[in-house]
Every structure is written in structure tokens, then in C-alpha cells.
Image (cartoon, rainbow, N blue to C red):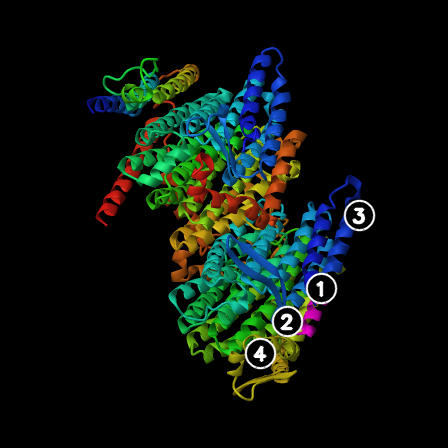
Amino acid sequence: MDRLIMQSLWLPGLAGLICLILVKVKSAEGFLDIVRRIIMLLVSAYCVYLGWMFLTAGSGIFPIGTVSLGGLSTRLLFRITKLSALMIFFTGIFAFLISIFSMKYRSGASHNNWYYGLSLWTLASANAVFLAGDLFTLLIFWELSTLFLFGLIALGDNKMSAFAAAKTLVILGLAEAGMLFAVAYIWVTQGTLVFSELNLGIASGINILLYFLIAIAAMAKAGAIPFHSWIPTAAEGAPISIMAYLPASIDKLMGIFLLFMVSYNLFVFTPTMKLVIMIIGVVTIIVAVFMAMLQHDLRKLLSYHAVSQVGYMVLGIGTGTAIGIIGGLFHMMNHAIYKSGLFLCAGAVEKQTGTTDLEKLGGLGKRMPILFFSNIITAFAISGVIPLNGFISKWFVYQGCLKAGQPIMFILAIFGSALTLASFIKVLHSIYMGPLPPELKNVKAPGFSLSFPPFVLALLCILFGIIPGIPLGKLLIPSLTESIPNIMKTLPSGTQFGMFNITVGSSFWQVGIGIILLFLGVIVGWIYYAAGKALKARKTQAYFGGIKPGTLAGYHTFTNEAVRVPGTGFYNTIKELPILKTILPDAEWGAFDPYRYVNKIGKALFVKPLKFLHNGTLSTYLSWVIIGLVLILIYLRMYYVSSMVG
Amino acid sequence: MTVYILDFIIFAIGIYSLIAKRHIIKKIIGMVLIEYSTNLFLILIGFRYGGIAPILSPDMNSVQFSQCAVDPLPQALVLTSIVIGLGTLALMAAYTMKLYEKYKTFDMCEIKRLRG
Amino acid sequence: MNNVLLPLSVGIPLLTTVVILLIGKFWKSIGTLLAPICGLITLIFAISLLDVPAGTYWMGGWPPPFGIVLVIDSLTKVLLLAVNLISFLALIYSVSYMQKYTAVAKYYALFLLMLVGLNGVVLTGDLFNLFVFLEIASIASYALVGFGVEHEELEAGFKYLILGSVASTAILVAIAIVYSLTGTVNMADAARFVVNMGMNKALLFAAALFIFGFSLKAGLVPFHAWLPDAHPSAPAPVSAMLSGVLIKVLGIYAMMRVVFSVFGAPAELLNIILWLGVISALVGVFLALGQYDIKRLMAYHSVSQIGYVAIGIGLGTPLGIAAGLFHLFNHAIFKSLLFLDAGSLESATGTRDLRQMGGLMKKMPVTSLATVTGSLSIAGVPPFNGFFSKLLIILAAIAAKQYFIAAIAAFVGLLTLASFTKVMRFSLLGPLPDIYKKLHDAPFTMLFSLVTLSILCFVIGIFYPFFMDSLFNPAAAAILDQTKYISMIIGG
């Protein structure tokens, strides 16, 4: 098993290095690209296998040595728990799908050696984070994964990508600075960093502070408010496949994994702390979903949803109830699946049409049926439509909220879910329905490489929804029973996670009933639709400013065909809501972005005055020097006097 | 003690001139005053009233000598320090000339392109 | 022990300076030829001195405290290595970089003179001798800062000259006071006096003047004002020397010698160093955030990073000092790397304004990678060397129960990261402006230095336990053991 653990690190690491140094030898670029694709494909497939091996092998601890730094030392070790094995398994699956997707998506792009190299290194560092048995390993690889993310976003090669990469690194760096401090503090006070040897289970002030420092790092990586704003910016700049790979899936896995671990394995999780975490979760759900509804760029819209969904995971973990935690972690898995799928759909659309602007898209449903199907499924899954996977995990989170005695949070969470559905109706409408804009006449269906990965993810959404027994009963529940046995014991008696039915105390969910309900719904909808058809609505030509199209010179291009309703204006009324009206004047790219405000305020408070003081006059500088000397003397004098007295 | 105070006054004048005067040459004069007062301070440390030059003549023994001769070491140090001061002064003068060539002014407050 | 390498480390550059000045009149490229060789020789000396035992060399055979004595101990070895390594690489870099300047021979002469001063300051065991070497290095650097003889260079050089002279004078006054009280200028002898008599008011005053003077040379806030002007104005290899080693040797090292070895590190002096460090770390990084001139930005980071070093040293614990020295060494490497990078970018694009650069990753891959390495090192990102020294300083601060200072150190690390992501974002990433379509990467000699320093950043990061154990922990132990220092030089 030692060998396998090391393989999960050095294999992607070495493969990444090989991809990186396979640089352009003029004519051989095409060939090298194929080599890189094959390497990534094979390595990520092998990582899936490794994840499976870890899952089946059972838990264990594997020391790898000690690290000592100036008199402090700690053992370094890797540990396999069922949960970390599960994470590695999923990480591998995402890497594999992304590598298939990238074949077409990145063909012809520049710096593909960096793309594949950094992707593989990300895989290695994510594996290391999941396997880490001590805070030192965790910290190092955590920061490394941020670094690789920075590089990958910078590969986007549009005018936003440099800014996006920088912003990402700074925001995540902020969170990691806190974590670094916390780790250093723990190391000095406890003398070790091994998880199992740490003793932080007392709810003292300093422990709560340390908890929040690490939890913030975790939530920043996952993208909870107020550390979310790197995700929307990154979405504008990064290659979409990277958005699907990191912020949508692996970063969520890492962030929520760490949040779960610090909350339940390292620190004591008091009711007040729970409340804070839950509030963060709910605020994230609501605020981000409002922001998402206003976007008309597919990339930004999806990224705000990626933020909003983090809220459910954080909320679930914050409830502190067994059912809520199951919901949070299950939602993390589901979210990684469907959000990755959504981003990949967007990537395929972008690759085929050259844009992600919803106003310019439309009518693609007939051209790309498979992609349309994948997108519908993933969109419904994120909105929590019965019987897809998103519904079940959200249902757990709701149960958790009620169980934790927070009905208001429960209502808000449901509200957020409804808004998500509303938002995705707009997306589906804008991309796939309505007439095809004339610029997109020549669009073709995406090939295998672009449509297969989202299709697989859509199938997974259905599978996890219809047979929740596989992800829950087989994978998640055993891992949680191992990680947090005490909390899992509090599940009400009679709880069971069968293949097709789930019973938690008095509430239950049966897939069969769900499907029947779904069919009823579809039938009702069909009746409504048929009734609409039967009534034969009057169709007429569109008029523009009172002029019939095609009748006046200058308007001849304005045909009936082109009258499209892009759907981007669906929810503009949100901007008119009284409260939001005041805070949202520049909602589309700025509000709720603490990064911007901190930047502005910090510059005005500290940088500008200091710059002003450096006025270039020698006399000013000389007087500082003299004042500095005088201050030193005064200090020494005071010290001297007090030491004489003492 | 009076001598030390007078020396300190020279030093203070130098500091004043260095900080308050705008003219480069005056600033340099201030700097030189500071250096000279420092050198003087070094000399004063080794000095004793009515002391003789620190040259050991055949007609005195070493105990007698060490009681009445001034301390020779500071004098050696001061020589070095004066030479260093000379080097600095030359460099300052050279800088002043070049600065005047470029900026056409001797006013140090005008020479402030580098700031912020 | 009389290791002849000690005086030779000072003597050979001095001799080469003279030769270059004499022959340089007739044959311009003598400097280009001799200076790197001289740098290599002193580097070899520094490396071969690494495993000699601590000892002294009596100049002219006069035993201390009468004669001048050169001392080598674990701390000296670290500094010697840093100085000669950086100066060798800077000299190699100069070969191509300085081609656009006239009077190249004078440049090399001044450069080597600066090396003389730096090696001398590091090796000497005599206070007045320290002052002399400090002035040699300073005057050479005053001249080198103004080497470009343009508006900015002259202005910066003059300001540096005036402020530096004030500091030198303060140091001289302090030496005079110490002499008047102890009757000696030998550090070990003075230290013996201080140990026997204890500190008194006058000695404290002298210590204050020392700290003031050395802080100014080190560029600690509020004595830093010359630094952001002077460092960017010098030619890139000189900037690398100034930021990389000069401020550390003339400032930090000399301050450590005096405060620890002579005054025995009383808590009040350490507190001053500590708080100067904290203020510098914060103010420097704030000012750096507002810069768009790439070299000025880096110069402000020097202020900030020197603050880090001062924090480590001001803590006064073995861990803190080792951490400070480790950071000092790392900073010497990555800051000189960054300044050399900036020089390459500047000589390629013709501008220092970040906003006018962009997309250079595509045209100058090696320089860009070196810049990324340097940026990540200074920002304290694993696995580069800066991360470990930053972590060590934070650990040391926490171990000394200075939680607030540890938090500030972490915060400054973040702002440094922010500032250098800005550098990378504007200069390396993003679209390439049309005017730079025909750029090439820097010539070989420049790339050699960049690549060597980048590799060092990485290697020191990966193998930090080895470097800590072999260099920095012994150095911290050596500087903390005042008794051993005294007995080593004047024998009990």
C-alpha cells in the first residue's frame, strides 16, 4: 500500500514534469501534443484505479519521515481513510474526463505543455492533500495546488486572464496566510502536527480562532462568501476546461474535505461556531444566486452558481447533525459532477460558437442534441429537480437544517434552490431554444471529445439520483461512519440507505414515488402544452417601431426569423427590488466583491499617505532620520530609568 | 567640558545647515561641519591638558610616558577619518557639478523627481 | 590559526581594482576579463573557508588587541558565502549587461572596491577597521548608484550619499564613545570590558548611535528613504549587490556584531531592532504595493524583507536568529535574482514601467521563469526557499510568545505575494504588445546568473534542513555566544 500511495504522488508529478519539458521542437508540436494527451489520459485513469484500490483496501497510516525546522519537529505521514480514498477516486475521474475534453478543446492552443503539466501536478497535489496525515504536508500541498491554479488560469490567454490569475492567487493567498499562522501556532504549542496526536478539542478562545483561520482557508478554496470573488473573475479569464477541473470540482472537494475535517476531526465544534458557519452558508446561497441571475455571460453565470452551491455544502456541515453532514458531503460530490458537466457544456458551446455571451447564443438545441441533453440534466440536477442527484443532497441539507432547529435557514435554502432553477431555465432557453441567430448558421455538433465528458457526468447525475444507494450506502455512509462515528450514531433509529429508498427517522424518500411524481408533472405539463396548441394562438408578424419588417429601406434585414428573445432580460426586475437597487448599481462586476473594496480602502488608507510622505525632498528624509534617532534615544532613556527604578 | 560643548555646537550647526538649508553647497558645508566636529571629538577623547606628544624619548620611562602623553590612537584614527571625509567630500562636489548640469539648479528642494 | 585566505579575500579584489584602474586607461575590456575571475576566486575562497574551524588572522603579526584582527566564525562564513556568491553572479551578468555603458573599467573597479569593503566588514574584528571598510563599500556604492549620470541616477546618488554620510558619522561617534570608555577599538576587548563593567548610560548612547547608523545602512524604516531611490537607479547588477548583500552586510551583519558580540545583546537593544523590523516590514510592503516601476517596487520590498530579517534577529532567540539569517541568505539570493531579472526585462523592453510591459513570457521564457521563481520565493510559496524562512520567522515569533508580530509577519507575506502577483501579471502574463514582437531573450552570460540563482532558490527550499544545520544554526549559536567570541580572539 505504501507503494500505491507514493505512486499517487510521484506518478502524476513525474508525468507532469515530462509534459512540461516536452516543449515545442518547431514542427513536432502536433506530435508532442498527442503524447501529452496520452500521458494525461493514462495517468488520470491510473489515478482512478488507485482511488479504487484505496477504497477497497481499508484505512491505514503510512509514515514517510519527519520534518524538523529550528528545533521543532513533527512526523510526516499519509493516512488513508475511506473518505480520502473516495476523494481521490473522484478526483481521478474528473481528471480523466477533463483530459478527454481537453483533446479537442485545447487543440491548437499555445503553452499546452504548461496546461498538461500543471493539470497533472494539480492532480498530484490534490491527492497529497487528501492523503495528508499531518498539517505540514497538508499546508505545503494546499499552497502548491493554489500555485498551479494560478498558472492554469493564466493560460487563458485573453485580456482578463492575467488579472484573474493574480486575483485568485491573492485571495487564496490571504486565506493561506491565516492557515500558515494557525499551523505555526499549533506546531509551536503542541510540538507536533500529526492529526491524531493533536489535542485541540477544548473550546478556548485561541482554539476557536485557529479553527476559523483554517476553516477560512478551506472555505476560500471552495469559494464561500466573502472569499468567493476569485471564482467569477477566474471564470472570465481561465480556459473553461480548467474551470470545470479546479474551481468546479477539485477545489470544492479539497475545500469541503478540509472544512469537514477541521470541524469534526480536529477542533471542537461549538453551537456558536456552527451558527457562524451556517450563516456563511446561507448568505452564500442567497447572495450568489441573485448575482447569478443577473449575468448574461454563461461563464460568469455558472461561476456564481458554483459559489452559491458551496453554500449548501457549508450549511450542511454547519448544521452539525448527521443528516446535514451527509447532505453537505453528498452535495459536494454531486456538485462536482454537475457543475463540472455544466462548465464542460459551456466549453463545448464556446468551442463550437466562439462565444459564451447568452445574448449571442440561441437555438442550438437541434444542432447539438447530445449536449442539449447533458446540459438539461446537469442544469436540473443543480436546481434540485426530482429525481436527480442534486435533489437528494439538498433534501438532506434541508433535513439537517430542520434538525438543527433552524427553520429560517431551511426556508432560505429552499428559496435559493428555486432561484437556481429559475436561473437555469434562462440558460437553457438562451442557448438551446428559440431561433438560431444568423451568425451561428454554420455551427456543427461537437465531436466525441467535447460531448462525451459532459454526457458521462449527466449520466452520473441520473444514476446518483435514481439509485442513491450507490453513492450513499456504498461510498459515503461507510466513510462517514469511520470518520465521525459519534455523530453518525445520532441518526434516528430506523434510518436506512437502501438502493432506491432512504429513510431518516420519520421522513423518507423513495425513488419510485419520485419518478411517479415526475411523470405526473410531465403529463400535466404536456396537457398544458397540448391545450395551448389546441387553442391555436394567433401568429403574426413582428413589428418594429410600427414598421413592418422588410417594408422599409434599412429595415430589410429585420426579418421575422431574427426576432429572438435571448432570455438575458428574464430577471432584470431583480435589479429593481428596493433593497438591491441601492447596492447593485454595478452588480454585474463589482458588488459583493470584498477584494475590490479592500483593495481600494487599503490603498487609500495606507499606500497613498505613505507615498505622499515620500516627497523626494532630502530635508524631509533627513528629518525622519533625526526623529528616528531621537525616538531610539527616548526609548533607551525610558528603559534605563525604569530599570534603575526597578 | 566646555570644549565638548563647543564641539557639540559645531555639530548642531552642521545638522541645522544640512536639514534647513536648501542650497546644495550649504548642505555639503553642513555635512563637512558634522564630520569635522566628529573628528574633533575623537581628538578630544585622546587629549589631556598639558600632555606631551606621544613620542617616547630616551629620557623617560614608560610609566611616566603613559601618564603625561596624549593618547596616540585617536590621532591615527582621525587621520584615516579625515581621508575618508575627503573622499566623501570629493564625491559630493562631483555630484553637485553633475546635478547642476542636469537640473540647472542648486536648490535641493527642486531636485525631487524621485518620490512616492 | 592563521588562515591566509582571510586577508586574501580582501586583498585580491583590492589588487584587481588597482590593476584594472591602471591598465583600464589603455585597454578598456581588462575589467570585463579580470573582474569575473576575481569574483570566482573570492567565491572559491568563501566556499573553501566553509569547513575551517573558527579562528583569527593577525594582520602584520600583531596580536590583538594591539593589531587589527580578522575573524572567521560560523556567522562570518554565511555572510562571506552570500557576498561572494552574489557578487560573482552579478559580475558574470555584468559582462553583457554593461556593454551599453561607457567607462566599463571604472565600473568594475568600483564594483570590486565595493567587494573589498563588504568582505572587509564581514571579516574584521576591529571596530575602527569595520568603519573603514564600511566607508570603502559605501563610497563605492555611492559612486555606482550615480553611474548612469542621468537625472534620476544623480539625484538618487546624492541623496544616498548625504544620508549615508550621516550614518557613517554616527557610527564614528559611537566608535569614539566606545573607545573613550573602554580604551580599545578591538571588538572582543571592548566586549570583555562591557561584560565586566556592565552597560552604562554612555554605552547605551553609543549603542543607540550604532543601531541608528547601521539601520540607515540597512534601510530600516524610518531610515530607509534613500533606498527606494538608490537601488532602482543603479545598473541592475549593482542593484542586485545593493539589495542582495550590501544592506545586509553593512546594516544587519554589522549591527549584529556590535549588538551581540560587543554589547552582549541586552533586551532593550533587541527590542529596538525588533520594532524597527516590524515597522519596516509593514511600511515597505505597503509602499511596494503602490509602485509600477518594477525596480522601485523591488527596492521597497527590500525594505520590507530586511524588516523580516530584523524581526528574526530582534527576537534574540536561537531560533529567531537562525531564521533571520536564513531569511537574510535567501533574500540575498532571490532579491538579486529579481533585480537581475528586472535588468533583463528593462534592457529588452527599454522601460521599467510595469504597465508598458506584458506577455513577455512568450518572448523571454527563461527570464520569465526566473522572474516567476524569484517572485514565488520572495512571496513565500512552497517549495521555494522564501517559504521556509518565512515560516521559521513566524514559528520563532510564536515560540517567543510574540503572537502579534507573528501575525504581522504572515500578513506581510500575503501583501508581498499580492505585490509580486502584480509584477507577474503585468510583465509576464497577458497579451504581448505589438512593439515587443521582435524581442529576444537575454544573452547567455545574463541567463547564466539568472538560472543559477533560480536553481539555488529551489535547491535551498527543498534541502533546507541541510542548509539550516550546516550554516544557519551554527551561525546563530556563534553570534549568541559572546564569551566564546572573546576567548577566541584574545584568549580568555
Residue at which label 3 appears: A31
The label nearer to you, 2 versus 3, is 2
Q: Earlier in the sequence, mark 4 or mark 3?
A: 3
Q: Residue at x 38, y 65 (%)?
A: A205
Decide if residue C67 is on the left or right side of residue A27: left
Which subunit holds the residue at mark 3? Answer: A
Determine the chain carrying the residue at label 1.
A
User: Mark 1 or mark 3: which comes first in sequence?
Assistant: 1
Label 4, on which residue? A481
Q: Which one is nearer the viewer's eye here, C123 or C380?
A: C123
Residue A212 lies in the magenta-colored region: no
Q: Are marks 1 and 3 in contact (CB under 8 Å)?
A: no
The answer to which of A388 and C12 lies nearer the viewer is: C12
Q: Are marks 4 and 2 on the same chain?
A: yes
The amino acid type of the residue labelled 3 equals: Phe
> Between marks 2 and 1, how big is the CA–CA gap?
13 Å
Residue ID for mark 2? A60
Q: Residues within 10 Å of mark 3 (few under 14, many from 20)?
A: few
Label 4 – label 3 distance at C-alpha? 48 Å
- Magenta stretch: dominant secondary structure: helix
Do marks 2 and 1 share a chain? yes
In the image, which is nearer the foreground, mark 1 or mark 3? 1
Going by the numbered disc 1, the residue's amino acid type is Arg
Q: Quadrant of residue A567?
A: bottom right
